[in-house]
């Protein structure tokens, strides 16, 4: 397996990236592009991207959004983020990154905020995406989401969580935490939703949710699958929290393989 760390500049912002090429890589398949959650980084995916790459033979790229890990920081005046910040992540950074990397219709694997961005990209650029694997996406704001964020604020203030996050976000740790909680707790954010965009999604979807997710309910899955125009596979996992690829990685890999078989070219 080959791992390469590198940077890509998009709209003047340096984004940290990692490419994973499995030893069994197949020459005829697209890249799987991983999109992390609100506090995520490349390393916080642990070994899951490499495991998926090996299981499928697909090359993988993982990147860190602006303000995360080793990517360039946010401007201090940009926190809290605007209510429509997902549009910026989609239209500028993700679209720009895909273009700079020369990716031809990648598969987007997103978790939480990353899954929301993946879905939004598939809605806004439907011809640019082969498929989406969505874990714990938010397409509207629920009471459980805000309650989970409020709990996170207390945990951050009263435990060693900050010091653990500093191993991944370094000097940006407080800023990345504030960019998450201050943005989502804005009164105006309570009305945010992207349900109206879902019918524009035409690619195949695997939509995953843990039934013990402290940040979202199964209703997110039902709305996504009920509104999109592409084929969908629902996966609501028992005894699973907000991070399905940690709680039940084997099931996620198997379901991802099944989705990829749907989109692979038929041998002549």
Image (spheres, rainbow, N blue to C red):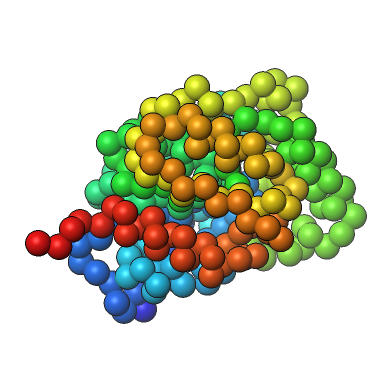
Which residue ends up furthest to the left in the rendered image?
268
Residue furthest right in the image: 158
Q: Is residue 171 visible?
A: no
The residue located at (57%, 62%) in the rendering is 245
Residue 46, given in percent of the width and then of the height, sits at 56, 69
Residue 162 in sight here: yes
* Front residue (pair 2, 124): 124
Question: Residue at the location (46% across, 66% down)?
Answer: 254
**Residue 30 image position (x, y, % from top left):** 28, 56
Left or right side of 156 for 17: left
Residue 215 location, quadrant: top right
Residue at 75 percent across and 22 percent down: it is: 187
Q: State the residue in front, 98 or 265.
A: 265
Task: Please say if 80 is above or below 133.
Answer: above
- The C terminus - image quarter: bottom left
Q: Relative to residue 260, is residue 194 depicted above or below?
A: above
In the rendered structure, the answer to whether residue 1 lies left or right of residue 110 reads left
Residue 102: % across, % down: 25, 50
User: Is residue 191 placed above or below 224 in the rendered structure?
Assistant: above
Count the marks: 0
Q: Residue at x 48, y 29 (%)?
A: 227
Closer to the camera, 171 or 233?
A: 233
* Image x and y of residue 7, in percent: 40, 56
Figure quadrant of the N terminus: bottom left
């Amino acid at each position: 397996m080959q791992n390469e760390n590198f940077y890509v500049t998009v709209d003047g912002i340096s984004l940290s990236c990692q490419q994973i090429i499995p030893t069994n890589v197949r020459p005829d398949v697209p890249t799987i592009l991983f999109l992390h959650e609100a506090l995520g980084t490349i390393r916080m995916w642990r070994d899951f991207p490499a495991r998926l790459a090996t299981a499928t033979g697909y090359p993988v790229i993982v990147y860190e959004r602006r303000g995360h890990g080793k990517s360039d920081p946010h401007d201090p005046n940009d926190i809290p983020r605007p209510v429509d910040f997902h549009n910026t992540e989609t239209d500028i950074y993700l679209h720009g990154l895909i273009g700079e990397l020369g990716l031809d219709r990648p598969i987007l694997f997103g978790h939480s905020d990353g899954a929301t961005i993946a879905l939004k990209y598939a809605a806004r650029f439907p011809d640019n995406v082969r498929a989406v694997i969505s874990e714990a996406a938010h397409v509207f704001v629920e009471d459980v989401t805000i309650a989970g964020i409020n709990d996170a604020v207390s945990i951050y203030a009263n435990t060693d969580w900050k010091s653990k996050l500093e191993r991944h976000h370094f000097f940006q740790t407080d800023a990345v935490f504030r960019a998450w909680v201050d943005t989502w707790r804005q009164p105006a954010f309570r009305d945010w939703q992207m349900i109206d965009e879902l019918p524009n999604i035409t690619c195949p979807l695997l939509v995953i949710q843990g039934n013990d997710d402290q940040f979202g309910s199964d209703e997110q899955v039902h709305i996504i699958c009920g509104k999109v125009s592409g084929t969908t596979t629902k996966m609501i996992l028992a005894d699973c929290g907000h991070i399905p690829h940690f709680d039940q990685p084997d099931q996620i890999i198997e379901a991802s393989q099944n989705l990829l078989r749907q989109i692979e070219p038929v041998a002549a």
